[in-house]
Image: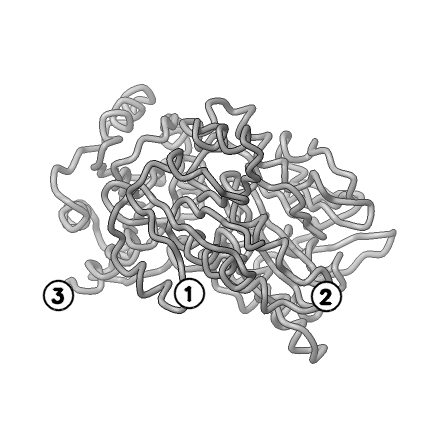
């Protein structure tokens, strides 16, 4: 008998899940709080589905065999609990994608509060070059990075590598999802409004290890006390930019070293990395562990470490305008991420904060503690303005003002302050939601405005 699946939440992951489920023979019902989603019908034009947009999901549970929920939907929502009580299996998109991926494909996963996208992209480029070298298999860079695992699950074959960015919101609903190699970069306060406590947030992050076996690898940040104590059955490799580790990646005399089973492999000088900042050295060390543990030759890893120039929206050089350098760090969606961006700045900096209308209940005081003379002024707008201004006052930072206009007005205000040789850094420390569709749209608009400034 044909089974029925209810897909709740019709963003990228919901669309890809609906298409996959249809291809696997399910009757597909789509659902979202919005009754009309521009472009959705075009995205789903090749499949048949039952449209239940705008209907409360609890009214759609009769006759459902499987429910796939968007990462933004907590598993403790009443309708999810009711579905489980009725015996309906409830999973998220990455679990669905994993189930329909070829079991001979290897999953290399990256998690953490900050740095996931950069490390996933870097690791993906390493494995792409590896597969080109050996002439077999493909590397798929998927997950929270923007391309759902379900979008390519049916394309995977034995010998392929899936490099997946895994976020806490996705890991919350896994069942069998297993990482053959898992790297955890760091854990700092984020999404507390969603999880309710730091302990629950940490527990969700740690789920990336729960299905690992002794045959797998776990790459852990030795400099992060939470991460370094992660529990897993996998073989542990550590990475550190501050000290040597017994097994894993570290820096000695300015050079990146990988050590495993008593054998040391020298890679490149740390100052030859194509990406700047101490946090990016940590990201690179994690990628080194994941790649070399999974059999990628050292010369491929070294070559990509040199050539990789980072990802869009992460301390991305945008333009030098009248001697003022603009950087787009729209992916700085929490205070810790912004701190890392500020610490990477070498010039006097005007920092743009807020730029969104969504409250994650973050503590912004640590942002102002990290300035160390780097930030000559801050400009802030959005719904978190009051909280950010209060944090600045608490830390005695006075060179901050609120902008009542939009992003263009913030940029013009920054230019009024900046002198030749300064930098303007968009690193909001806040989510973009409520003002923009996502951090990518925020970053693209920032770049459009900056690049349209008349000479």
Q: Indicate which disc, 3 or 2, sits on the residue closer to the N terminus.
A: 2
Q: Horizontal and vertical percent for residue 232?
A: 74, 37
Is the residue marked by circle 1 packed among few (<14), some (14-19), or many (20+) residues within 10 Å? some
Q: Horizontal and vertical percent for residue 454?
A: 12, 65
What kind of element bears circle 1? loop
- According to the picture, the residue beneath numbered tag 2 turns out to be 296
In the foreground, 371 or 294: 294
Which residue corresponds to the image point at 49% horizontal and 42% vertical from the top-left? Answer: 63
Q: How is the image coloured?
A: one colour
How much space separates mark 3 and mark 2, taking CA atoms? 47 Å
Where residue 454 is drawn, which disc sits there? 3
Q: Indicate which disc, 1 or 3, sits on the residue closer to the N terminus.
A: 1
Q: Indicate which disc, 2 or 1, sits on the residue closer to the N terminus.
A: 1
User: Height in image: 270 above or below 91?
Assistant: below
Of the residues tagged 3 and 2, which is closer to the observer? 2
Which residue corresponds to the image point at 23% horizontal and 30% vertical from the top-left? Answer: 385
Is the residue marked by circle 3 packed among few (<14), some (14-19), or many (20+) residues within 10 Å? few
Of the residues tagged 1 and 3, which is closer to the observer? 1
Q: Left or right of 429: which side holds 174? A: right
Query: Are the residues flagged by discs 1 and 3 in contact, CB closer than 8 Å?
Result: no
Q: Left or right of 117: which side holds 355? A: left
- According to the picture, the residue beneath numbered tag 1 turns out to be 47
Which residue corresponds to the image point at 55% horizontal and 28% vertical from the top-left? Answer: 85
How much space separates mark 2 and mark 1, taking CA atoms? 39 Å
What kind of element bears circle 3? loop
Q: Residue furthest right?
A: 262
């Amino acid at each position: 008998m044909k089974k029925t699946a209810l897909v709740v939440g019709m963003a990228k992951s919901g669309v890809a899940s609906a298409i996959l489920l249809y291809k696997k023979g399910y009757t597909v019902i789509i659902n979202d709080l919005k009754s009309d989603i521009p472009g959705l019908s075009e995205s789903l034009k090749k499949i048949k589905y039952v449209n239940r947009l705008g209907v409360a999901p609890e009214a759609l549970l009769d006759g459902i065999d499987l429910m796939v929920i968007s990462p933004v939907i907590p598993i403790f929502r009443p309708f999810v609990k009711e579905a489980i009580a009725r015996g309906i299996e409830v999973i998220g998109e990455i679990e669905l994608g994993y189930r329909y991926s070829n079991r001979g494909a290897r999953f290399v996963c990256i998690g953490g509060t900050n740095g996931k996208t950069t490390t996933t992209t870097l690791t993906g480029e390493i494995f792409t070059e590896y597969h080109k070298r050996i002439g077999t298999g493909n590397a798929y860079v998927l997950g929270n990075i923007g391309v759902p695992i379900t979008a390519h699950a049916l394309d995977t074959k034995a010998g392929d590598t899936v490099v997946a960015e895994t976020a806490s919101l996705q890991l919350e609903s896994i069942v069998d999802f297993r990482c053959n190699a898992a790297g955890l970069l760091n854990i700092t306060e984020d999404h507390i409004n969603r999880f309710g406590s730091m302990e629950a947030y940490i527990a969700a992050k740690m789920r990336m290890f729960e299905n690992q076996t002794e045959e797998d690898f776990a790459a852990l940040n030795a400099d992060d006390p939470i991460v370094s104590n992660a529990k897993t059955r996998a073989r542990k490799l550590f990475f550190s930019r501050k000290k040597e580790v017994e097994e894993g990646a570290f820096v000695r005399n300015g050079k990146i070293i990988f050590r495993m089973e008593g054998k040391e492999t020298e890679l490149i000088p740390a100052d030859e990395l194509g990406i700047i900042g101490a946090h990016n050295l940590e990201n690179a060390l994690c990628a080194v562990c994941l790649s070399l543990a999974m059999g990628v030759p050292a010369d491929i890893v070294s070559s990509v470490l040199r050539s990789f120039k980072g990802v869009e929206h992460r301390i991305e050089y945008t333009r030098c305008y009248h001697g003022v350098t603009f950087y787009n760090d729209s992916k700085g969606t929490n205070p810790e991420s912004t701190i890392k961006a500020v610490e990477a700045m070498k010039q006097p900096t005007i920092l743009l904060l807020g730029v969104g209308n969504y409250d994650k209940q973050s503590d912004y005081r640590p942002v102002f503690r990290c300035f160390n003379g780097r930030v000559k002024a801050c400009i802030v707008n959005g719904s978190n303005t009051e909280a950010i201004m209060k944090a600045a006052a608490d830390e005695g930072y006075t060179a901050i003002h609120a902008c009542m206009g939009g992003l263009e007005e913030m940029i013009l205000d920054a230019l009024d302050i900046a002198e030749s040789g300064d930098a303007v850094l968009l690193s909001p420390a806040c989510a973009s939601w409520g003002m923009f569709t996502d951090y990518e749209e925020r970053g693209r608009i920032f770049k459009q405005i900056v690049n349209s400034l008349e000479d």
